[in-house]
Image (cartoon, rainbow, N blue to C red):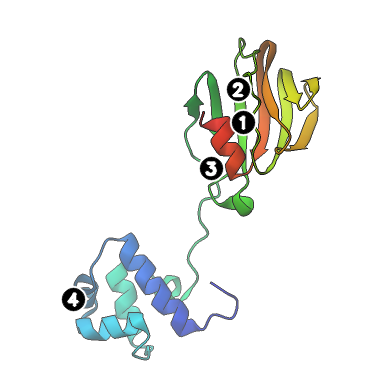
Amino acid sequence: MTANEAVDARVRRRLRELRAERGLTLAQVAERAHIDISTLSRLEAGKRRLALDHLPALAAALGVSADELVGAAPAPDPRVRAKPVKMGRMTAWPLTNRGAAGGLQAWKLLVPAGSEDPPDELPVHEGHDWIYVLSGRLRLILGEKDLVIEPGEAVEFSTWTPHWFGAVDGPVELIGIFGPQGQRLHLHD
């Protein structure tokens, strides 16, 4: 809803949203509100002007107050509830919902012990990666550099540079922010 959204447009949108949330058909809502189905259809589509006397009956038919019908939809639950993803030996917990931050997504990753050997050819892809080590020691090969990233340290790099990361001397917990290309490479191989 925009700040300038007209009340009638907001009510039409809320009618459709509430009807869909409750799995009700136009016929069911029209019957409950004691109005003709074609009237309800035209109200939702904006082809008929909404009258104030429609509000109480429509609200009751949808099981909400007239204020809830006229008001904005409640804000969605901000909690991220996606399940961890297991890929190979690594486990990743999403920390952002899909589509947030322009395609970037934050993950908590557990890189288990025994993940010390890079592939023969280091991957390269479009994008930019950001990694923060929470615990353990992370081995990062970035082009010709072979680095050990300690807890509390962060790295950020262009993924056009050949790169790989793994564990040193035990498991590593990290937070990573990856674009769509990095997610496909790092989290789904």
Q: Earlier in the sequence, mark 4 or mark 3?
A: 4
**Residue 168 visible in rendering:** yes
Task: Identify the residue at image location x=66%, y=22%.
Answer: 173
Q: State which quadrant residue 186 falls in.
A: top right
Label 2 sits on residue: 110
In the rendered structure, are the residues bearing label 4 and label 1 in contact, judged by CB atoms less than 8 Å apart?
no
Q: Find numbered disc 1 in the image and state the secondary structure of the residue it sits on.
A: strand
- From the top left corner, tell me how far across and down residue 39 is, in percent: 25, 86
| 164 to 100, vertically: above or below | above
Q: Amino acid at mark 1?
A: Lys
Q: Indicate the quadrant where residue 154 lies.
A: top right
Seen at 71% across and 39% down, the residue is: 160
Marks 3, 2: nearer the viewer: 2
Circles 1 and 2 in contact, beta carbons < 8 Å = yes
Crowding around mark 3 (Cα neighbors within 10 Å: few <14, some 14 to 19, many 20+) is few
Q: Residue at x 34, y 60 (%)?
A: 21
Please report whichever mark, 3 or 1, sits nearer to the chain's N-terminal start. Answer: 3
- The front one of 173 and 187 is 187
Give the Cα separation between the discs numbered 3 and 1. 12 Å
* Foreground disc of the pair 2, 4: 2
- For label 4, the residue is 31
Q: Which mark is residue 80?
A: 3
Rendered position, 35 above or below 67: below
Q: Give the alpha-carbon distance from disc 3 to disc 2, as whole Å.
A: 18 Å
Can you see residue 35? no
Q: CA distance from mark 4 to mark 1?
A: 50 Å
Q: Are marks 3 and 2 in contact (CB under 8 Å)?
A: no
User: Looking at the rendered structure, which numbered label has been put on residue 108?
Assistant: 1
Q: CA distance from mark 1 to mark 2?
A: 7 Å
Q: Amino acid at mark 4?
A: Glu
